[in-house]
Amino acid sequence: MIGSDRYRTHTCVGAADTNGATVRVAGWVHRRRDHGGLIFIDLRDRSGLLQLVFDPEAAPQAHAAAHRFHNEDVVSVSGPVIARDAKNVNPNIPTGGVELRVAEVELLSSSDPLPFSVEDETQEASEEVRLAYRYIETRRPKRLRALEMRAQIASVTRGVLEDEGFLEVETPILIRSTPEGARDFIVPSRLQQGKWYALPQSPQLFKQLLMVGGLERYYQIVRCFRDEDLRADRQPEFTQIDIEASFIEPEDIYRLIERLLVSQAEAAGVTLHAPFPRLGFAECMARYGTDRPDVRFGVEIQDWTAQAAASGLGIFEKAVEAGSVVRGICLPAAGGGLSRKDLDGLVTDAQEFGARGLVWAVVGEDGLRASVKGEFLQGLAEAFGAVQGDLICLVADTEDAALGVLGSLRVRLAERYGLIPEGAWAPLWVTDFPLVEWNPDQKRWDARHHPFTSPRPEDIPLLATDPGAVIAQAYDIVLNGLEIGGGSIRIHDRDVQQAAFATIGVDAEEAEEKFGFLMRALRLGAPPHGGIALGFDRLVMLLLGEKSIRDVIAFPKTSTGQDPLTGAPSEVDDDQLRDLSVRNVPPKGPAKAD
Ligand code: ASP
């Protein structure tokens, strides 16, 4: 390891193995205990903690200096590392069997009082303050470990991909915008006044052009930028593991990503078993109400429309007559201890997910408790195979709405009632997505993935006649209910690309105007190709058991896209604006939600 003996000969944890040798270590004063005579300091560096002992008799100068140390002062000390008395051994830290008896000390940098404690992680400051002093927060062992693991997982990623013959290629950051469905960040050009660059939402078109360029196997651990509302644990800049390959089929991508994820997970101490199960989109929606299902637990959605239509229950019969479907879930043992209030609360949960109402039933000791009366529910409970304590939830609505509500409720209630097995990992491929989806506001078809995704060859004729029925050669990879990646086989034929554009309302002229460079490339020898991108931040977050992607990003932004540390975004000098021929106009008011 590089490092100067002037400051240290060993790391804190490395020093523990030196058996009586005199060593020098350097780091931060993590905690100090002044026992009248002896002073104990836990010294912290990236490797961990080491106990230092200052003895007023053996080393009076060092002891006097230690007396004046504050938490988080940076010091370098030297002395012998010796075994602690048996009664002082701390089994909780790797260096707990030894201590360094300090002979000499040097204060390298002193610290003012801190805005929050490094040592006491329970003493939580607001996120604003923690991000403003992110470098203090980073010193916490848990945060350091997260960044170490992130680096480790990136390194494993490079190893696997390079072993598979992938080349890491950088693509530009100042680009013409690539549609990925989000808003672009844009950058004014000084040299071409009145023109703007966009920051890449992903390197999609560049990686495709690299395939036309003969690279065959490309990857990049790359920053992407999307100007979206940040409510749901998103960041305006995030990192993807971006992959593209020529002469491949979806099976090749599945095998590659399974190998990659198994290795990445292993680096984080998690075991995943390949091959991963696969589920077609339509079946996935019907069974789980979402295209990123958490399959660590069962609780599948069931169709009870036919039974509900003949149930004798007015609410159901009328709903079905009016064209609604009735779908339900049965949560094992979830209803046991629930009060009437808890059960009524389920209706509020369902409404939060957009339901107009919810019928619940619990199998109790003395029969069924339910929000509506009727024989029907008894029969249903039996058909579900429900046993005592099980909770049944039913929703009558349009198919999309009923599935959406139950899909969300399924996960919320499984979390609430502990139905997700501890330590379970459930990766899943979702395949066979529709190519396009109807945008009722704009009254047009939109690409579901992006407009460069290839239809199944047999569906190409449907592009013009029945776009909604076209199935894409697209796949998502889902882990524990979170989408961690997605990709597709791309269109490599200009006529198909033109037809795909036409389906989403981009005519030949607009295609030429916006994507002329792609259309030209597709005429000049484009190999069949496809790829995928994995959300790196989210993957690392999941593997480390963190709650937010901010926990695995060194310098994240707040939910309003600000960086309290540096104060970005900030105003700029008028001169800078003048150089760009850009003028500030009064703000529009708060940004509208997407
Ligand atoms: N560019 C896509 C995305 O960022 C991924 C892909 O199709 O490879 O989602």
Image: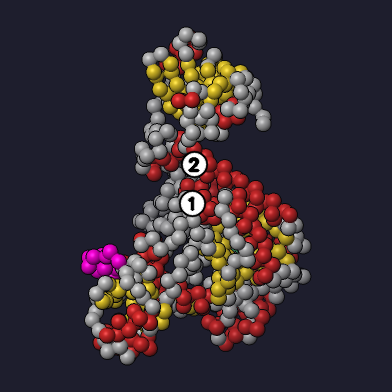
Residue numbers of the magenta segment: 336-348
| Local SS, label 2 | helix
Above or below, comparing residue 303 to residue 592 in the picture = below
Q: Which numbered disc, 1 or 2, marks the residue closer to the eye?
A: 1
Q: Earlier in the sequence, mark 1 or mark 2?
A: 2
Task: State the CA–CA distance, disc 1 to disc 2.
Answer: 12 Å
Where residue 85 appears, x then y in whole percent? 49, 22
Q: Is residue 245 left or right of residue 22?
A: right
Q: Quadrant of the C terminus?
A: bottom left
Whether the residues at callouts 1 and 2 have beta carbons within 8 Å, the answer is: no
Where residue 155 appears, x then y in whole percent? 65, 48
Where residue 553 appears, x then y in whole percent? 51, 47
Question: Where is residue 409, by image quadrant?
Answer: bottom left
Where residue 412 appears, x then y in whole percent? 38, 64
The quadrant of the picture showing ligand 1 is: bottom right
Question: Where is residue 82, by image quadrant?
Answer: top right
Above or below, comparing residue 589 to residue 325 in the picture = above
Check disc 2 and report the residue beneath it: 143
Which label was assigned to residue 545?
1
